[in-house]
Amino acid sequence: MNATTARRSLAALRTAIGLGALLAPHQTGRIFGMDMASNVGAPFFARLYGARQLCMAVPVLTDAADIDQRMLARLGVQVDVTDTVSAIAAGARGYIPLRAVAISGAVSALSAAVGVVAIQNR
């Protein structure tokens, strides 16, 4: 996978997750293993997460000339690593179910790995 393909693949994933979290937060949360019914504030935070995902995806998908794509990829890796650590920490403290740790941790860790490829200048 070259850097351009990695960037576009991540942008597509971020768009799907972002739109899902914004438009259908309960369903998206359940896909990620979250118990959305037990926390009335969960949809709000899902939508914040969705907005963040779209903010990282749109510049790549629109090929915005004034955005440094490699810098955006570096920031994305930092966000994805933080998400991975957060999922593990939340699971260790019992805040989220093991299924949610596995799914969200795997998605964010894989995104970080693809993001490393996206940083390359190829």
Image: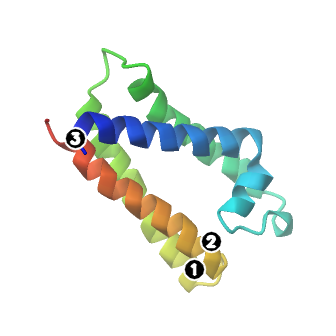
Horizontal side, residue 95 vs residue 35: left or right:
left
Q: Amino acid at mark 1?
A: Gly
- Marks 1 and 3 close (CB-CB < 8 Å): no
Whether residue 82 is visible, yes or no, is: no
Q: Which residue is mark 1?
A: 91
Q: Is residue 105 above or below residue 52?
A: below
- SS of the residue under disc 3: loop
Disc 1 crowd rating (10 Å Cα; few below 14, some 14-19, many 20+) is some
- SS of the residue under disc 2: helix
The residue closer to the viewer here, 108 or 5, is: 5
The residue closer to the viewer here, 35 or 122, is: 122
Instruction: Identify the residue shown where x is 39% and y is 28%.
Output: 60
Where residue 105 appears, as percent x and y from the top left, is 49, 68
- Marks 1 and 2 close (CB-CB < 8 Å): yes
Instruction: Identify the residue shown where x is 33% and y is 44%.
Output: 75
User: Which mark, residue 2?
Assistant: 3
Disc 3 crowd rating (10 Å Cα; few below 14, some 14-19, many 20+) is few
Q: Which residue is mark 2?
A: 100
Label 2 vs label 3, nearer the camera: 3
Label 1 vs label 2, nearer the camera: 2
Disc 2 crowd rating (10 Å Cα; few below 14, some 14-19, many 20+) is many
Query: Of callouts 1 and 3, which one flags the residue occurring earlier in the amino acid sequence?
Result: 3
